[in-house]
Image (cartoon, rainbow, N blue to C red):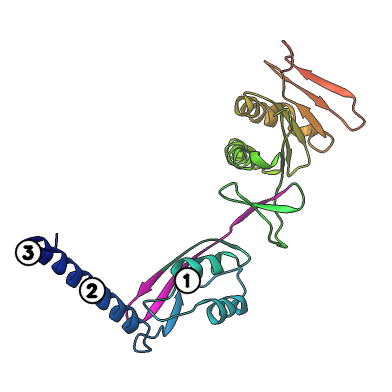
Amino acid sequence: MWDNAPLLRTVSNLLVGLSVILVMTGAAHYILQLDVFPLNTVRLSEAPNHVPKELIIRVVAEQIKGNFFTVDLNRTRAAFEHLPWVRKVSVRRKFPWSLEVDLEEQVALARWNGNQLVNTHGEIFDDKTDQVLPAFFGQTNTSPQVTSIYGELNKTLLPLKQQITQISLSPRFAWQLRLNNGIVLELGREHMQQRLKRFVDVYPYSLSTLSQTVTHIDLRYQNGFAVYLPGGADVLDKHLSGNKV
């Protein structure tokens, strides 16, 4: 090997090139650490509605370290995402010498099982609110399904100018609604929209006069439904045929 001049020149050139790269890398690292690249500003793309201003200031003061080039964007994003009412955050460098933060807040759609909230994406979160919201009940992993069905069934109710104040999905996957007029609707496990549509079509002509006394309507029939008055007495079976499902 030692008498192989071409090989020695190749090895020498490689070592020299590696040394240059290491020196340049070290120099670049040193330069980037200097105070000549200060991080002067942290800007939010828009003002939040729920996130307290003082908590944002605390994150900026305590969690954002380094200069424009060395600041850890992942750490900064994670720090903002730990704030209450924050769903998702993106952070990017923006010249001259600032960070821009896009902060997406949670939008509370309903209360989940009485002690949590669910957002418009069907995700459960633990923040607090004084808003008057509908109530969702179900198993934890069913929140996206309940959210989706809630939106679809509310559209079906539009002709009646009624809204769902409570929707429940039982462990056996049976659906129940409570409307803002207090009536409870049993929809069962399948064909929920068709059953509710049938109720919407019939209600103005056959049931509106009973709306002050009706408490419970069972829609789990193939061609009709049963209406119950307070006390549980069955006062009306409309076009009953077939079995409940």
Amino acid on which the number 2 mark rests in the picture: Ser
Amino acid on which the number 3 mark rests in the picture: Ala
- Give the side of residue 193 with respect to residue 1, left or right: right
Label 1, label 3: how many angstroms apart (C-alpha)? Answer: 66 Å
In the image, residue 237 lies at what x, y percent? 79, 18
Q: Give SS at disc 1.
A: loop
Q: Give SS at disc 2.
A: helix
**In the image, what residue occupies the spot 65% across and 29% down?**
196
Which residue position is annotated with label 2? 19
- Look at the image and give the residue range highlighted in magenta: 92-112
The residue at the far bottom in this view is: 36
Q: Which image quarter is the N terminus in?
A: bottom left
In the image, residue 220 lies at what x, y percent? 72, 21
Amino acid on which the number 1 mark rests in the picture: Glu
**In the image, what residue occupies the spot 89% across and 33% down?**
230
Q: Nearer the viewer, mark 1 or mark 3?
A: 3
In the image, residue 11 lies at what x, y percent? 16, 64
Q: Is residue 113 above or below residue 77?
A: above
